[in-house]
Image (cartoon, rainbow, N blue to C red):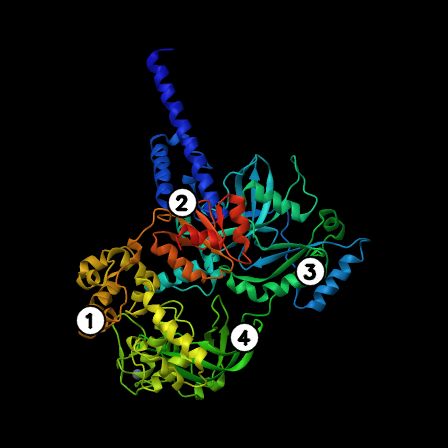
């Protein structure tokens, strides 16, 4: 072989090798991020790998393979082809209460001599699909359709990163799963659509369906879709599962994302407990669930039980009580918040919604009331979603509706009777009176709250009394209170007076970031305050910051920058800040006292600490240059475990992250 030819071949070989290693690396990170929810590199590092791969593939297009991560971007098709399922997708019979569950189990149990174990899984409210893999490669993805024939949407499914393009084993398998959109992404998508004046989706399920059935799969790629896999059909290979539980463990090992909230139970009582546990806990999840699927665990038992004409006899779907209910709107109450925004609240005829009695619901704002034409006396549909407070979704058509007077938004503040104003770019109505007692009280309440100065023993009722007595009208007054003043409050004895007095005085030592948060600058919450003081670590620096400097901070837009600038150029605010300074508040970002041991380190807190709250521990970490995170990953430097730690401790042990108890933590931070 000629030397030149040899060198060319060697070059191609090296490129091929690099492409392969990039793919493996990217696939590994996709898996960590989208399937395990446990990223191990930064977005920047990921993007660098990805653009290098794209660059090489552009130079050598013949080297592109169907399982390359670059192939997740998609293209345009003219329609979806029909596809006959190899195995029929049955629907499940529903059960609605304990009695029906017990009856179902009796029918199952009487066929066998030994107790029948069950597997309980959350029923994800998404779209069922079937995926086929040949020799480890993803070949076809089909919608459920009528169970016999579905639509081939392989191209769109390829854009979903929790769907592996290649499995960890070269095997043939068909799996089923549910495609869903996280609630948080659904809300974000609707917000964006609202801004663009596009159509809004009714719920995460509709948003997922709309995103999945796009003929242009590059649109699907932009939507945050994910999949939980819950069934595997394994016909051949070196492992043939004997139970449903084992098959779930198996598909997990192949690289599929499965739902972690799954339980193997000995009988129907265990399953009933699982349903009860999740009836309310499901609202904490970032995806919608509408019930629990209960399956017989042993696959040979499943075969023996078989199917009715439409559903398997070995499984049932327990449906949660509805999240939506209709009830009567009795009144619309008005509240005034710390920004002066007047918000309407629905007063309802009490109704049982998803396990709790509801008598109040959010109405968002007056535009929303007008848009939905909500009138007092209407029958309305209310819905409980991720939030604790339910929302009014719509008015139920009725003859009565037309006879009711149209709701007129208030013209005056319900508290101080000042005229209400509108502000550019905001939908709310505002009370513009800085002395409005509602606004003043809300600001004081915010000042002492957990999110701001975190002052124990002072709650809304104490604030209200202090205000009514004329003792406190602005936060700085709290610090001028004398010990004796607290005895003027209802039922206050020496002990609680001491507690309140000390708690207020001690808050002077709170972090600078909490102080800036507590100031209630419009649009500035805890996170923005932290961004702000990282750039401008003293009050002096904040006062001198120009509008341009403020809006150049990442995460701070023009609107927020304007509001910060105005706050620090308002004469009254400057006088107030001087008062705080005279009282001995520290006006410096203590994060400047960074300690070597904590700098850049990530901490996760779990369990209950004795000498401080988790929030306080978080502050101690942050002022020393460390970071806190809510989930454990390989990037976690330390896990601090208090009493009764949660699953985070298990995960830390598994990953080999250093675990500190409270004493060890205090030693580390030098306290
Ligand atoms: Zn007012």
**Real-space Cα separation, disc 3 to disc 2, in angstroms:** 47 Å
Q: In what element is the residue under mark 1?
A: helix
Q: Is residue 610 above or below residue 58?
A: below
Residue at label 3?
A: 270
Q: In what element is the residue under mark 4?
A: strand
Residue at label 2?
A: 75
Residue at 54% over, 81% down: 350
Q: Earlier in the sequence, mark 2 or mark 4?
A: 2
How many residues crowd mark 3 within 10 Å: few (<14), some (14–19), many (20+)?
some
Q: Earlier in the sequence, mark 3 or mark 1?
A: 3
Which is more foreground, mark 3 or mark 2?
A: 3
Q: Earlier in the sequence, mark 3 or mark 2?
A: 2
Q: Nearer the viewer, residue 47 or 234?
A: 47
**Real-space Cα separation, disc 2 to disc 4, in angstroms:** 42 Å
Q: Quadrant of residue 333?
A: bottom left
Q: On the picture, is 369 further left or further right than 384?
A: left
Whether label 2 touches label 4, CB < 8 Å: no
């Amino acid at each position: 072989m000629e030397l030149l030819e040899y060198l060319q071949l060697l070059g191609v070989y090296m490129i091929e090798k690099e492409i392969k290693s990039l793919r493996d690396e990217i696939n590994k990170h996709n898996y960590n991020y989208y399937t395990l929810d446990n990223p191990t590199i930064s977005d920047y590092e990921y993007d660098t790998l990805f653009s290098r791969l794209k660059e090489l593939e552009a130079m050598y297009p013949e080297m592109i393979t169907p399982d390359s991560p670059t192939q997740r971007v998609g293209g345009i098709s003219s329609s979806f082809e029909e596809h006959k399922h190899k195995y029929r997708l049955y629907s499940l019979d529903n059960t609605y209460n304990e009695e029906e569950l017990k009856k179902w189990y009796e029918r199952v149990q009487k066929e066998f001599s030994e107790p029948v174990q069950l597997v309980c899984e959350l029923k994800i409210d998404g779209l069922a699909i079937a995926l086929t893999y040949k020799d480890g490669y993803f070949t076809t993805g089909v919608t459920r359709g009528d169970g016999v024939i579905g639509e081939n949407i392989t191209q769109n499914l390829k854009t979903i990163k929790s769907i592996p393009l290649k499995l960890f084993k070269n095997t043939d398998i068909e799996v089923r799963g549910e495609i869903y959109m996280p609630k948080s992404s659904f809300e974000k998508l609707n917000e964006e659509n609202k801004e663009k004046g596009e159509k809004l989706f009714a719920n995460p399920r509709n948003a997922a369906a709309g995103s999945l059935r796009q003929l242009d799969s590059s649109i699907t790629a932009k939507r945050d879709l994910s999949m939980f896999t819950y069934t595997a059909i394994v016909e051949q290979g070196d492992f043939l599962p004997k139970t449903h539980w084992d098959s779930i463990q198996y598909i997990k090992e192949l690289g599929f994302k499965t739902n972690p909230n799954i339980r193997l139970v000995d009988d129907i009582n265990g399953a009933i407990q699982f349903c009860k546990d999740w009836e309310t806990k499901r609202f904490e999840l970032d995806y919608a669930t509408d019930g629990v699927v209960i399956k017989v665990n042993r696959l040979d038992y499943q075969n023996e039980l078989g199917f009715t004409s439409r559903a398997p006899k070995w499984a049932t779907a327990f449906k949660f009580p509805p999240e939506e209910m209709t009830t009567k709107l009795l009144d619309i109450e008005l509240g005034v918040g710390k920004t002066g925004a007047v918000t309407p609240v629905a007063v309802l005829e009490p109704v049982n919604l998803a396990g709790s009695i509801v008598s109040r619901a959010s109405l968002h704002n007056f535009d929303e009331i007008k848009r939905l034409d909500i009138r007092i006396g209407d029958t309305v549909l209310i819905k409980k979603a991720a939030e604790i407070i339910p929302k009014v979704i719509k008015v139920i058509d009725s003859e009565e509706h037309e006879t009711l007077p149209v709701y007129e938004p208030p013209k005056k503040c319900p508290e101080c009777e000042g005229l209400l104003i509108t502000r550019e770019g905001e939908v709310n109505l505002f009370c513009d009176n800085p002395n409005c007692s509602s606004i003043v009280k809300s600001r004081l309440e915010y000042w002492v709250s957990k999110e701001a100065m975190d002052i124990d023993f002072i709650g809304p009722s104490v604030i209200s009394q202090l205000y009514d007595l004329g003792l406190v009208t602005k936060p700085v007054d709290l610090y001028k209170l004398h010990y004796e003043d607290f005895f003027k409050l209802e039922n206050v004895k020496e002990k609680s007076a001491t507690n309140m007095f000390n708690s207020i005085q001690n808050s002077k030592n709170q972090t600078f970031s909490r102080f800036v948060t507590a100031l209630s600058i419009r649009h500035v919450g805890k996170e923005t305050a932290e961004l702000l003081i990282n750039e401008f670590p003293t009050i002096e620096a904040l006062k001198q910051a120009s509008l341009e400097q403020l809006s150049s901070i990442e995460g701070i837009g023009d609107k927020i920058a304007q509001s910060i600038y105005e706050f620090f150029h308002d004469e009254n605010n400057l006088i107030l800040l001087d008062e705080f300074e005279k009282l001995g508040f520290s006006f410096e970002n203590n994060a400047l006292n960074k300690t070597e041991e904590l700098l850049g380190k990530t901490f996760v807190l779990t369990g209950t600490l004795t000498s401080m709250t988790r929030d306080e521990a978080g502050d101690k970490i942050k002022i020393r240059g460390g970071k806190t995170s809510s989930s454990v990953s390989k990037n976690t430097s330390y896990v601090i475990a208090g009493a009764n730690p949660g699953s985070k401790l298990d995960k830390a042990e598994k990953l080999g992250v250093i675990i500190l108890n409270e004493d060890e933590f205090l030693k580390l931070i030098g306290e």
